[in-house]
Amino acid sequence: MTPVKTFLGYPHPLGATWMGNGVNFAIFSEHATGVELCLFDSIEDAKEDVRIPLKERTDQVWHVFLPDAQPGQLYGFRVSGPYEPERGLRFNSSKLLIDPYAKAIVGAVSWADEMFGYVIGGEKEDLTQDFRDDAWGVPKSVVIDSGFDWQNDKRPAIPLHESVIYEVHVKGFSRLWRDLPEQLRGTYAGLGSPAAIDYFKKLGVTAVELLPVHAHIDEKLLVDNGLTNYWGYNTIGFFAPHGEYSSSGQIGQQVAEFKATVRSLHAAGIEVILDVVYNHTAEGNHLGPTLCFRGIDNLSYYWLHPEDPRFYLDFTGTGNSLNLLHPRTLQLVTDSLRYWVEEMHVDGFRFDLASELARNHSGFNALHPFFQVIQQDPILSQVKLIAEPWDVGEGGYQVGNFPVPWSEWNGKYRDSIRGFWKGDEGRIGEMAYRLTGSPDLYEHHGRRPYASVNFVTAHDGFTLTDLVSYNEKHNELNADENRDGDNNNQSWNGGAEGPTDDPQVNALRDRQRRNFLTTLLLSQGVPMLCGGDECGRTQNGNNNAYCQDNEIS
């Protein structure tokens, strides 16, 4: 390998930083015995062209400066240390690792056995280390130049009590929109196009809430079944915008394209809120792949079973949970949030399974360091903070219990409104609470009605049209024999399951849709519309279309 000039570098900032005269690389690992930086000339390279040992370590951060490196450089890390899953240690220098602070990521995971840190099919499962190299099949991190002409961009700064949120998927919003040029459909540029902005303005929304745009991957099981993780709740890079949504196709250009989209939306007075998934990563449980955090410092990043750290505590239903009690994991999350606010100019966040972020050893804690850090942060405390106030762990349902200044997806509002218009008995008193900002949930904490983000439908569950057209879910295309998705939809089909030519049933369904939307828009609190509900979008009864990258979604 060709020798490369190096200097000691700096432990801060973490990640790869273009300094104008070279690139500084810094990565945290408390328990590693060694770290190597791997440089690639091309995404097609099966092996790194240069491997550089990081000899300098400061406060558990390994770092080096490369004066000859430039933006566009592809890289990854190899981290050495003991492979002892029984102790929670899963180091394996045979595996190339994505930088947790990568600002851009290129490539997809090639799902072969080499992507796992252990021998697939071995008698001891994950206890036997796999020594085969996997660099050929792992996404590469990309050095970027953060420079961008924001053209005096100003945040719309719309008060929550004046906000109307529109939840939408970047790709799904415009992929089939024939009025857009083909190269813009399903992209960031399509979302920020004049046609899209005109649509948002006519609709009357003040903010778009984007389903995950952090870099994410498709699980092996989905790929094996010819499916994808379309929604994107399978994050592998908390700083990198997902590359597939870029119209340019050039390595690293997704960053500038995302910024341009935010700039265009802001110029039209529309805010950008990101749906963020900091509760888990794409690495799954103890039998999952080694792609990033697991191989860098498994003990620090994840909640491990206190009596058997080979296994992960799972409050998310995904196989693992990030441990924000560890200061470096908390730093990862807050650094990511600040990056998206300061560098990408977003206006707020919706936190997926937010109860997990505030867990300690006893459960949910409203005084968790995560809340305290955000509340004391002069940047993060000033943006919109919206919690999905539950997770799947014990005591995870925390609607009404998040602290000021948080707002919450009000699941009780959804259930009450659905039940009332379906004709359930005993809903009138509850309906009164929901129409007036749910004071039974928020008033005793001194919170205002805008603490309640009201919704009838969202990305998970039936669309509005399906809510009035189906009594049962129809998820057969998800390749799980219709077992996935919620069975309790509180829906009513009006007398026929699915599409019908019966004019009376269709008239009833239309009236029910108007009932739902009128109630939503007239209730105190912050209304959130699910993208497509305004024009009758259907998923054909699929209430869990997370893996349907097609006309269904």
Image: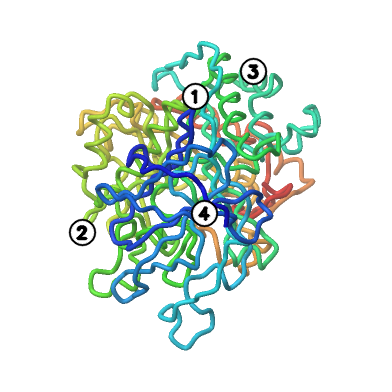
- Under mark 1, the amino acid is Val
CA gap between label 1 and label 4 equals 46 Å
Instruction: Decide: few, some or many residues near mark 4? Use Cα within 10 Å; few <14, some 14-19, many ≥20.
Output: many
Q: Nearer the viewer, residue 174 or 132?
A: 132
Indicate which disc, 1 or 2, sits on the residue closer to the N terminus.
1
Which numbered disc flags the more N-terminal residue, 2 or 3?
Answer: 3
Spatial distance from mark 2 to mark 3, Cα to Cα?
48 Å
Q: CA distance from mark 3 to mark 1?
A: 13 Å
- Whichever of labels 3 and 4 marks the residue nearer the N terminus, that label is 4
Q: Which residue is mark 4?
A: 38
Residue at 37% over, 46% down: 63
Circle 4 or circle 2, nearest the eye: 4
Q: Nearer the viewer, mark 3 or mark 4?
A: 4
Q: Which residue is mark 2?
A: 361
| Amino acid identity at mark 3 | Lys
Q: What percent of the width, then of the height, locates residue 69?
A: 53, 39
Q: Residue at 66% of width from left, 64% of height from top?
A: 476
Residue behind mark 3: 202
Q: Amino acid at mark 4?
A: Cys
Labelled pair 3, 1 in contact (Cβ < 8 Å): no
> Is 291 located above or below residue 177 in the figure?
below
* Element marked by disc 1: loop
How many residues crowd mark 1 within 10 Å: few (<14), some (14–19), many (20+)? many
Element at label 3? helix
**Kind of residue at badge 2:** His
Dividing the picture into quadrants, the one containing residue 330 is top left
For the point 53% across and 83% down, the residue is 121
